[in-house]
Image (cartoon, rainbow, N blue to C red):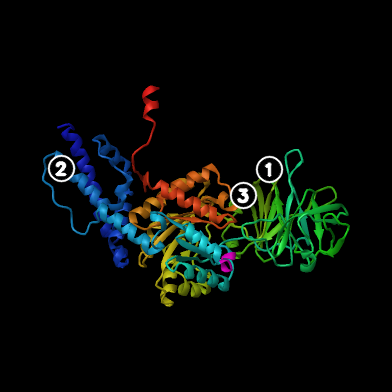
Amino acid sequence: MVFSKDELEDILNALDLAIAKLIEYEEKYKKPLHKVHPKYKQSAKNLIHYLALRSFDESFLQEKLEKIDMPFSPRIGNSIFYNLFYFQVIIKSLLKKEYSTCPAGIITNKEAKKTLQTNSEALFGKLKNQRKTGIMVTQPTEAATNSHLISSLLNLGMDCARINCAHDDKKIWKNIISHIKSIDSSCRIMMDLGGPKLRTGKMKAGPKVIRIKPKKNNFGKVIEPSKIWLAPIGVLPPENKIADAIIPVNKKWLKKTKKGSFIIFNDSRDRKRTITIEEEAPNGRWGHCYTSAFITTGTVLNVHLQHTSVSEIHSVHETQPLEEVIVLKEGDMLRLDKKPILGQASHYDSENGTTKIAHISCTLPEIFSAVKVNEPIYFDDGKIEGVITEVHLNFLIIKITTTKKNGGKLKADKGINLPASHLKVGGLTKKDKLDLNFVAKNADVVNFSFVNNAHDVSDLLHELKKRNANIGVLLKIETQKAFENLPSILLKAMQNYPVGVMIARGDLAIETGWKNVAIIQEEIMQLCDATHIPHVLATQVLENLAKKGIPTRAEITDAAMAQRAECVMLNKGPYIEKAVKMLDKILSKMQRIQKKKGAVLPKLVFNEEVLINQ
């Protein structure tokens, strides 16, 4: 015998203990196991087995098996009892001991793989281009009026469409869904309930001014002019084109301008400026300006046609107020109001001393009874960090501890996170329940935001039952509580079919700490695999590409690793079509060498001659 008898007996004892623990947990959680949907019976049991195995340090068993060259792969999590039983059979065979056959009703590796595929298809539909990982795309508002964009996204590889109920309205949602279904009736509609998202309140309106600001280098030299869109009020630039400034003008006056025309005006500081028309569009004109300028309502524009002295005078139409912002630097103080008081920047005296600190309200006043002094607070996806220094009945005082070197800009409707506070916030809001009336009739899957515990899931399932809604549920895991309660959340959700999990890395990173998010992401993926429940990887996947048209190297690698998930979510952006196309290629190529957590080894093409002669 290659391995000593004592060593093999030691391993067999460890396996016996592990299997005994699986049976113990199965009996312990008999009641919740009985309640799951019939299609999840074996999967729920495997989840319980996974929890049993993780109830002690499994690295102990892993090391013992590896000593005799038996790999303890993460893949065993898909069918834990089956794999441990056959480890046991192998050891007993080596010891020349009798062994029994595998008990009935135990899911095998092959069955586990097939179950996950079936559950994924039930949630995301049949995937395009023979991919094993789906692509979910967040729909922009313009999808309600631009069927060409939807057609393009579908052709490029979009498998399912996400609509966020936190934005737009029922009319827009309905139009988006109608366009999608008219082009591809099989495309799944996934609708996010907004949930009890804690955000900053409204700001006071800023001045009604349009700022023209060309790009400069570090030496103050203009390297790129400001790109300006001139059009009648309400006419936005063509799709996939971004303007640095939009100037509302008269339609008839605008038609007289041509490529090469130039507009002379005195801005609000009485400085003479020039805009040159560089491109004609059906509903507007594109111009550029090499100098900074401030334009207000009534600013006189004098357009000169090229090679002629003829000019046309016009006044700028009503301008929209600039979005007010609060600039916060390290050490600054901020007041967070309980009441919906319009936010405002700090006031300063003639010597630049603060006479009134900046203040802004929040959307969930109930948090004020839960927060404490010295607890951290984060704004705008963690871009601005602070600590609570005072807690009052109607406001909090916050000291800013970390932000950008030149100050972070805080605006209305930006996320607020209180990771150390014990907030009693979760479940369905009044708006969620109203939106659910639409979702139940028009969506294939409801995405449940800010779920924290099994009770939240129970409320959602109750509301779906009231509406006779036979749709899928996608659980968005974005808080520390949700992660801690994930096993019970899954068991409760598995009373419905189908079910999925979204790893919402944005809020999750802030809630659990940046240094922990990679580990927590991995833990969630392992739990989902054990439960044969598909999971979606979300937040900032190819974000730079979708928003700016050029990907970063890091996000390409991130997208490649996302192939381990059953679906990947892309957020909207001006270059979303490029992002979908890129993601489709990355996922298709990655599945040739990566199979979930295991590597696939196709034929490697390399230069043999160079290798031989080196």
Residue holding disc 1: 405
- Of all residues shown, which one is farthest toward the front? 307
Q: At label 2, which amino acid type do we have?
A: Lys
Magenta-colored stretch includes residue 291: no
Horizontal and vertical percent position of residue 294: 81, 55
Secondary structure predominantly adopted by residues drawn in magenta: helix
Q: Is residue 176 left or right of residue 116?
A: right
| Residue named by callout 2 | 92
Residue 383: give its label. 3
* Three-letter code, disc 3: Lys
Q: Position of residue 125 (x, y in %)?
A: 39, 63
Magenta segment boundaries in residue numbering: 141-146
Residue type highlighted by circle 1: Lys
Question: Where does the C terminus fall, quadrant-wise?
Answer: top left
Q: Report helix, strand or loop for mark 2.
A: helix
Residue 429, given in percent of the width and then of the height, sits at 53, 69
The answer to whether residue 144 is magenta is yes
**Upstream in the sequence, badge 1 or badge 3?**
3
